[in-house]
Image (spheres, rainbow, N blue to C red):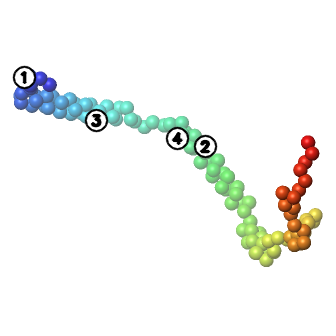
Amino acid sequence: MDHTRDNPLKRFTSFWLALLLVTTFAIGALILWPLSHGDVETVADLKAVDRLQVKAEVQKAQTENLNAEALAEALANAAKAPSQAPSPGSMAVPSLAPESVSAEDPAESPEPNN
């Protein structure tokens, strides 16, 4: 800013004009806020009613089908049974190879014929 055009009166006036502008904007925003932000129903709010209804039906059906006595019995039986019970067609796990059999050294193997 040019020093010849700068004086305390202009600074004082500019400050109060800026403060007035900000205050006017704030008052306008307070007046217009209730007009623009009323009770708005979004699509998510409308769909939530259907989702909650379906969720309630699913929970009711799951509660009806849950047999707590059979579940407790199954858990008790599972604790008694071995975890690796043999099944039909299962094969025994092979043991390690005997120590007499060793892998061939790659340096001793013959070269392939091309």
Q: Give the CA distance from mark 2 to mark 4.
A: 10 Å
Whether pointer 3 and pointer 2 mark residues with C-beta atoms closer than 8 Å, the reply is no
Looking at the picture, tell me which residue is in the foreground, 33 or 113: 113
Provide the residue designation for mark 4: 45
Looking at the picture, tell me which residue is in the foreground, 99 or 6: 99
- Secondary structure at badge 3 equals helix
Provide the residue designation for mark 3: 30
Horizontal and vertical percent position of residue 55: 63, 50
Crowdedness near tag 2: few (<14), some (14–19) or many (≥20) residues, C-alpha within 10 Å:
few
Furthest residue toward bottom: 80
Could you tell whether 6 is left or right of 109 in the image? Answer: left
Looking at the picture, tell me which residue is in the foreground, 74 or 78: 78
Residue 95 appears in the rendering: no
Horizontal and vertical percent position of residue 35: 35, 32
Q: Give the CA distance from mark 3 to mark 2.
A: 36 Å
Among numbered discs 2 and 4, the one appearing first in the sequence: 4
Provide the residue designation for mark 2: 50
- Looking at the image, is 10 positioned above or below residue 88? above
Q: Give the CA distance from mark 3 to mark 4.
A: 27 Å
Looking at the picture, tell me which residue is in the foreground, 18 or 75: 18
